[in-house]
Amino acid sequence: MLLAVGCSSQKLPPNFKFGAATAAYQIEGGWKADGKGKSIWDEFAHTHKDAIVDGTNGDVAADSYHLWREDVRIASELGLNQYRFSISWSRILPSGLPNNMSKAGVKYYSDLIDELLKQNIEPVVTMYHYDMPLKIQDLGGWTNPLIADWFADYARVLYSLFADRVKTWITINEAVVICDMIYNTGILAPGIKNEELGPFLCNKHLLLAHAKAYRVYEREFKDKYNGRLSLSHNILWIEPYQYPRDKELAKLGLEYMIGRYSHPIFSKEGGWPPSVEKKLLEYSLKQGFNYSRLPSFTEEEKQLLKGSADFYALNYYTTHMIRPAKEGEKGTWFLNGSPELGAMLEIPADAELSASVIMPVYPKGLRKTLSYLKNSYGDIDILITENGYPGKHQMYDHVRLKYIKDHLTQVYLAIKEDKVHVIGYTYWALMDNFEWNSGYSVTFGLYAMDHKDPKKIRSPRLSSQYYACVIKTHEINVSDECVNENIEKLHLQEYHSFGNSVCASKALIVLLILFYFS
Ligand code: NOJ
């Protein structure tokens, strides 16, 4: 099998795992099937139609509640080693509390897990992906300190049901979105905007909820099942806008972005990053509070959190540049800046734009993030739990193919050159789904799914064929032959050799240079 012309081999390690991801509200539908309780997204999408660009919702979505066998079939067709999906808390526990468990909900996830294992696909299970049971939200959700115990109770239910078969768990997906983005904007469920205390109460309680869920596993299940747990963090890589002027600000920006959610768990000292703690206290006092808006941890809480993860779970999408805010400018973390840091974020000039304004494409940021995590928290295993391209509806999605290839190249370099221990890569998403405020107007899927199609057929895009070849060979610069072979099998005819043209032009430049100096 020939490699694409002019490209040298770039192989990921033999034990490297390839996956794809989805989340319950975004794919399942069946929003009130078989006694499922309401989640904040069921409620929000019905009551805030105008917050969703196409006025749609996840009532039916990809109908995975009924078509889950199809999901496993396409995962297996791709050759995935892992499938990351989330469990809807209110499908298992309709009121959020463990005194009332839904048999139908349990059966749904149990069957899905069994089928995945039958196909040799390892389930990677997220316990919470934005869909808080409404009844728990009514009691304050993440701003109520009791959430830590309620979440730990829910986690215990999941372990007792599935830990015999699930060995990799993600407690909570993207804390920074749940706390900072949601409470700073109110544009996502539950639609509450409270910039002063919301993000920071949520930050603390969410971390404690994670830690309590981790300790339940450690105490009651680890010996028997030996699984691994973490929480997945969405990292926006941050570069100085003007160097060296903004170097220190970028450092603080990264502590604010990454450290606030990672330092308490992964650092040797534990607790909040000192620079962030100091900044927030100063800012709060200046605002007229007589305490920091970032609540402190007790010594006991610090110990509970420290070391409460077995690997780092990273969602990487994009990079921004940071600069001091000008007079009158006020950003919103983590969209475009932070009043607390007195900073604004800018899109890098050399980033490529995508169908999502907040996600310009910047693969180099992934390698930098991976190195940063190693340098900050030691030589830990890192699982990339999300990375994906927001596009439109094309089937011949050359740009997505290039996106995956470019990001995998950065992973390859991080492993080879920077010796970072990256153990796997998960593409978001297995198929098109409900993209929160963007509804179905933006697509991420390796497989297309038209939400208007009553059958919700999953159709392979070109990128899926490239990804299948990478999975089969672990080679990033896959041969055209491999992609074409699969395309023929899938009756796609129109493959333009994108990989080749990139590699061939590089080869041509090398030839010209050699010719010039000969
Ligand atoms: C992160 C979230 O986990 C997921 O739900 C979302 O669809 C993707 N990013 C793309 O925005």
Image: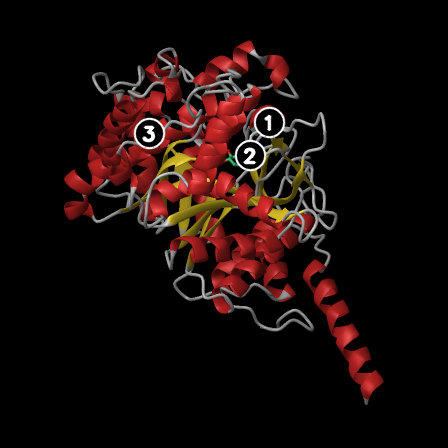
Query: How many dots with numbers?
Result: 3
The residue type indicated by label 3 comes to: Tyr
Front residue of 469 and 180: 180
* CA separation in Å, label 2 and label 1: 7 Å
For numbered disc 3, what is the local secondary structure?
helix
391 lies left or right of 384: right
Name the residue tied to disc 1: 453
Name the residue tied to disc 2: 457
* Marks 2,3: beta carbons within 8 A: no
Say whether residue 62 is visible: no
| Quadrant in the picture for the N terminus | bottom right
For numbered disc 1, what is the local secondary structure?
loop
51 lies left or right of 33: right
* CA separation in Å, label 1 and label 3: 23 Å
The residue type indicated by label 2 comes to: Ile
Q: Which residue is drawn at 48% across and 61% down?
A: 472
Front residue of 378 and 233: 378
For the residue carrying disc 1, how many other residues have a C-alpha within 10 Å: few (<14), some (14-19), or many (20+)? few
Q: Residue at x 16, y 40 (%)?
A: 219
Say whether residue 367 is visible: yes
The residue type indicated by label 1 comes to: Asp
* Marks 2,1: beta carbons within 8 A: yes
Q: Nearer the viewer, mark 1 or mark 3?
A: 3
- On the image, the x and y values in percent for residue 280 come to 48, 31
- On the image, the x and y values in percent for residue 61 come to 52, 25
Q: Residue at x 53, y 43 (%)?
A: 252
Name the quadrant containing residue 187: top right
- On the image, the x and y values in percent for residue 114 come to 30, 41
| Quadrant in the picture for the C terminus | bottom right
